[in-house]
Image: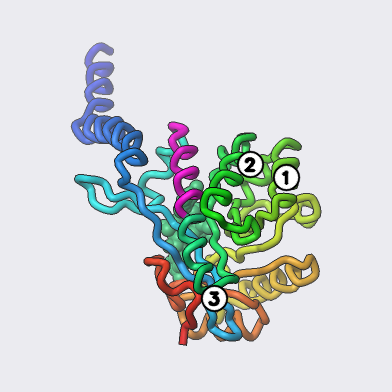
Amino acid sequence: AAKAAGKSAYRTCTPGLRESAVSRAELIADLRRAVDEEELHLEFQPIVDLASGAVRSAEALVRWRHPRLGTLPPAKFLPLAEETGLIIPIDRWVIHEACRAAATWRSRAPEATVAVNIAAAHLRRPDLIATVTAATASAGLAPRALTLELTESALIEGTDAVLERLHQLRELGIQIAIDDFGTGYSSLSYLHRIPATELKIDRSFVARLGTDDRAYATVEMVTRLAGAFDLAVIAEGVETERQHEAVTAIGCPRGQGYLYGRPDSPATVGQNRA
Ligand code: C2E
Ligand code: MG
Ligand code: MG
Ligand code: MG
């Protein structure tokens, strides 16, 4: 028995595991400094009017220039940020930076808007309102030029306090998008309750356009639903001409995806794709 216990104890301390435990602790310490050390930056991905090709909006996507590991995508550090609560200062920084960027775009394209992603934990905090108000005010950005992107799971977890907060944000003029729409627990009653202004059709449906009739029907249905609810709608993850033609034929008014532009500098906002 002693031998067996020794063996399993050894197994839980294999070099690989010990290494990843250390690097995880290091990564947390590094992440704690990342905001102060100005290691985060934003890339902006254009959101395109499909009829005209005009770029009137962009989504802010955070990246981390890690001093040793290079540039990390959100999937590499946001889960850790969420576990440790560091997501709150990160999201705050993102909101401020995105508002500042959008204010400069609007000097040449007065209708330009910006979208930022908001973590579920942030939505549960009453100070989200103060953060958003401070960010728009200090950037001199009209609140209606800012869209908060929320996932269905963040919304579904939402208490009455969250719902009240969403209404307060709407009263301030902030736009509310439901991100990755169709991947969570979308139900019609929930769409009646949430004061959303926009649906973003998840890219998993867009990716299957042209090869899967049910994906086509889903994109068509969500586009119609958005129209009936008077919501804006964006097809996410458009990568090919074929997908572009399908979303255009369906009548989806706006799109986002590698076909129109990768996440990059904000230079394209206010310009035409063609
Ligand atoms: P999301 O909000 O759904 O953002 C869209 C993601 O899809 C981005 O990945 C974008 O680069 C990627 N994408 C855009 N077009 C295409 C395409 O045509 N094909 C494919 N395959 N992918 C495409 P990214 O930047 O890695 O971000 C991943 C997720 O991380 C975001 O998903 C969002 O949920 C989260 N995120 C990003 N930035 C922030 C942030 O500042 N705060 C918070 N809380 N979450 C963020
Ligand atoms: Mg998003
Ligand atoms: Mg999305
Ligand atoms: Mg996503």
Amino acid identity at mark 1: Gln
**Residue ID for mark 2:** 129
Residue 96 magenta: yes
Position of residue 67 measured from the top left corner of the image (x, y, whole percent): 22, 45
Helix, strand or loop status at disc 2: helix
Asked whether disc 2 touches disc 3, contact meaning CB atoms under 8 Å apart, the reply is no
Q: Quadrant of residue 227?
A: bottom right
Position of residue 102 measured from the top left corner of the image (x, y, whole percent): 50, 62
Asked whether disc 2 touches disc 1, contact meaning CB atoms under 8 Å apart, the reply is yes
**Residue ID for mark 3:** 48
Measured in 3D between alpha carbons, the distance from the residue under mark 1 to the one under mark 3, in whole angstroms, is 28 Å
Residue 47 magenta: no
Amino acid identity at mark 3: Val
Pointer 2 local density, CA inside 10 Å: few below 14, some 14–19, many at least 20: some
Measured in 3D between alpha carbons, the distance from the residue under mark 2 to the one under mark 1, in whole angstroms, is 8 Å
Helix, strand or loop status at disc 3: strand
| Dot 1 or dot 3, earlier in sequence | 3
Considering only vertical position in the picture, is 230 above or below 33?
below
Range drawn in magenta? 84-97
Amino acid identity at mark 2: Ile
Tell us which disc is closer to us: 1 or 3: 1
Helix, strand or loop status at disc 1: helix
**Residue ID for mark 1:** 168
Q: Name the residue: 65% across, 72% down.
A: 219
Pointer 3 local density, CA inside 10 Å: few below 14, some 14–19, many at least 20: many
Q: Name the residue: 30% across, 32% down.
A: 29
